[in-house]
């Protein structure tokens, strides 16, 4: 609840400050910032009180690859749905082959 209140305060503050300056996109940026902050706070709180051995390096690689593919798809291939779909398929295959053993263990149960 505390994290949600912090995020709500950030969203309201950013909306009040930046909507008059940059318009409705300020609301989108405020929401992104608030949800990002909730994710970071939840991770740090969980790490302190409920430690789980996350594979941070692997997660960072997945996030970086998805970010790069998203930016490429949006900036260079905006209306080319075939290439965007190929990026999605390539990303899915990357995850599948890297997580094959884990996926097999999950589906065997």
Image (cartoon, rainbow, N blue to C red):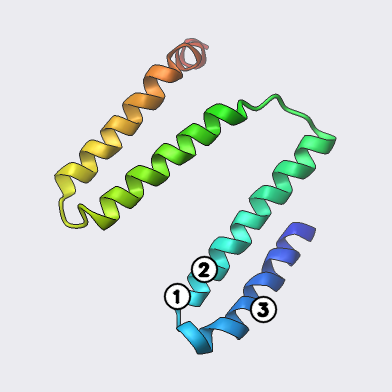
Q: Where is 13 relative to 39, above or below?
A: below
Q: Is residue 70 visible?
A: yes
Q: Where is 29 relative to 89, above or below?
A: below
**Which residue has dot 2 on it?**
29
Q: Residues within 10 Å of mark 3 (few under 14, many from 20)?
A: few
Q: Residues within 10 Å of mark 2 (few under 14, many from 20)?
A: some
Residue 25: mark in rendering: 1
Of marks 2 and 3, which one's residue comes earlier in the chain?
3
Quadrant of the rendering where the N terminus is positioned: bottom right
Give the image location of residue 72, x and y in percent: 29, 49
Q: Where is 98 relative to 73, above or below?
A: above
Q: CA distance from mark 1 to mark 3?
A: 14 Å
Give the image location of residue 103, x and y in percent: 46, 17
Q: CA distance from mark 1 to mark 2?
A: 6 Å
Report if the CB atoms under discs 1 and 2 are less than 8 Å apart. Answer: yes
**Which residue has dot 3 on it?**
13
Q: CA distance from mark 2 to mark 3?
A: 12 Å
Give the image location of residue 48, x and y in percent: 83, 37
Residue 94 image-quadrant placement? top left
Q: Residue drawn 46% across and 15% down?
A: 107
* Image label count: 3
Per the image, label 1 sits on a secondary structure element best described as helix
Give the image location of residue 5, x and y in percent: 75, 66
């Amino acid at each position: 609840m505390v994290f949600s209140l912090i995020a709500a305060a950030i969203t309201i503050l950013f909306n009040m400050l930046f909507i008059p300056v940059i318009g409705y996109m300020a609301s989108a940026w405020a929401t992104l910032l608030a949800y990002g902050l909730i994710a970071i706070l939840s991770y740090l709180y969980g790490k302190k009180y409920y430690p789980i051995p996350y594979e941070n390096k692997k997660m960072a690689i997945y996030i970086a690859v998805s970010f790069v593919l998203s930016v490429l798809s949006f900036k260079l291939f905006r209306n080319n749905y075939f290439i965007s779909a190929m990026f999605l398929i390539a990303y899915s295959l990357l995850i599948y082959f890297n997580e094959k053993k884990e996926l097999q263990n999950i589906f065997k149960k």
